[in-house]
Image (cartoon, rainbow, N blue to C red):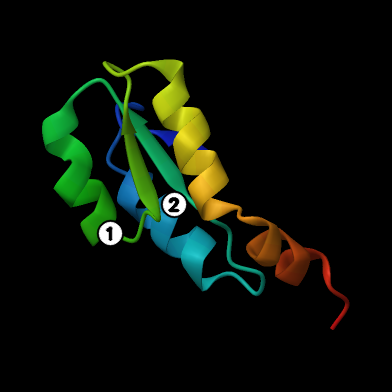
Amino acid sequence: VLIDWELPGNSIAILIEWLKEAKKPSKVIVLSRRPESEQAALTVGADAFVSKTHSANNLLDTLHRLFKPQERDKAISPL
């Protein structure tokens, strides 16, 4: 799940907590134009943070890191 840290309101942290506590937790990547938001995003449970001030390759690298083939296979495997 990609979430913009600058969405209006104060519910981003609650949304991340809900996603992580769900029956099938999701990987959460927070995007922000403010690199100083990284620690706050990771503290509330984001799996990764990507600054919008960096190149798109940074997002691609993060996606590859979070969804390595063995991780992807586990997510697809039947129960």
Residue 20 in sight in this render: yes
Circle number at residue 44:
1
Would you identify the image quadrant in which residue 56 lies?
Answer: top left
Give 21 or 48, whichever is nearer the viewer: 48
Q: Amino acid at mark 1?
A: Val
From the viewer's perspective, tell me whether residue 65 is left or right of residue 47: right
Residue at the farthest left position:
36
Q: Position of residue 71 (x, y in %)?
A: 64, 64
Farthest bottom residue in view:
79
Picture coordinates of residue 68, whole percent (x, y): 61, 55
| Quadrant that contains the C terminus | bottom right
Describe the element under mark 2 as helix, strand or loop: helix
Find residue 51 and report its image quarter.
top left
Q: Residue at x 52, y 59 (%)?
A: 19
* Tag 1 secondary structure: loop
Q: Earlier in the sequence, mark 1 or mark 2?
A: 2
Q: Nearer the viewer, residue 60 or 40?
A: 60
Give the amino acid type for the residue marked by disc 2 in the picture: Leu
Residue 23 in the image: x percent, y percent?
Answer: 65, 75
Rendered residue at 37%/54% (across/down): 46
**Of the two numbered discs 1 and 2 in the rendering, the one whose residue sits closer to the viewer:** 1
The picture places residue 16, in percent across and down from the top left corner, at 42, 54
Disc 2 target residue: 15
